[in-house]
Amino acid sequence: MTRHCLPVSVSISRPRPRHRLAGLGLTLGLSLLGGCSVFAPPTQLHGIQVDKDDIAQLVTGTSTRADVAAALGSPTMKASFDDNTWIYISERTYLRIAQTPGVEDLVVYAISFDDDGILRGVRRLDEKDSQPVNVVSAKTQSPGTEASFLQQLLGNVGKFTPAGAGAGPGGQGAAGGGLGSNGGGGGFSGR
């Protein structure tokens, strides 16, 4: 049995310019697609999420603080000067360009009680109820933080002793090398 070999020719060809452009276009398209919302992290929830159904369970004039706490949970905060006003805040945020947070939705409920703890009213607050807050960059001075020139000058009087004062025989104190059993200094005595 004889074997016949067929001539095989292998040719290595360069990729066509059309394929290069397609690869470049695909790479560019995928890099631009990275900024799309498909790859964005999900929105984040902050605070206590209050449903309208939970609010509907509350009856003005009959519901108590315990009923409100059972339906909505503990409040996000209480009003600064009124313990009879509970505030529930929920916020849904997302990440914008350069990872800065943006507010997608903000819901604020103010729930007020009378002095006996009975529900007086439920108000949903929005942006028109908000007030701007101006932040002051000045520092608040507190007494005792600034020392006068005289206090700085005389502040260390009595805290330090002159060299050799209080030292035992041999001219050294307890930290200077210790005292031996014969009363002489264990270190250099200057003799």
Image (cartoon, rainbow, N blue to C red):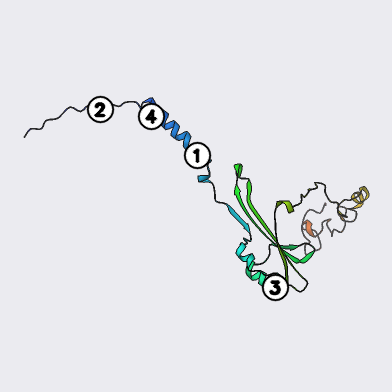
- Tell me whether the residue at label 3 lies in contact with that at label 4, contact meaning CB atoms closer than 8 angstroms: no
Give above or below for 160 relative to 36: below
Q: Which residue is mark 3?
A: 64
Badge 1 element: helix
Q: To which residue does mark 4 refer?
A: 19
Residue 33, disc: 1
Who comes first in sequence, dot 4 or dot 1? 4
Residue type for callout 1: Leu
Mark closest to the chain's N terminus, 2 or 1: 2
Name the residue at 77% across, 55% down. Answer: 187
Residue at image coords 82%, 49%: 139
Left/right placement of residue 144 relative to residue 126 reads right
Q: Earlier in the sequence, mark 3 or mark 4?
A: 4
Quickly name the residue at label 2: 10
Distance of mark 1 from mark 3, alpha carbons? Answer: 53 Å
Quadrant of the rendered image containing residue 82:
bottom right
Give the mark nearer the N terminus: 3 vs 2.
2
Question: Residue drawn at (90%, 54%), measured in percent from left and top?
Answer: 157
Against 46, residue 117 (above or below) is below
* Image marks 1 and 3: residues in contact by CB distance under 8 Å: no
Q: Nearer the viewer, mark 2 or mark 4?
A: 4
Q: Amino acid at mark 2?
A: Val
Could you say which is closer to the camera, residue 7 or residue 156?
7
Earlier in the chain: of badge 1 and badge 3, it is 1
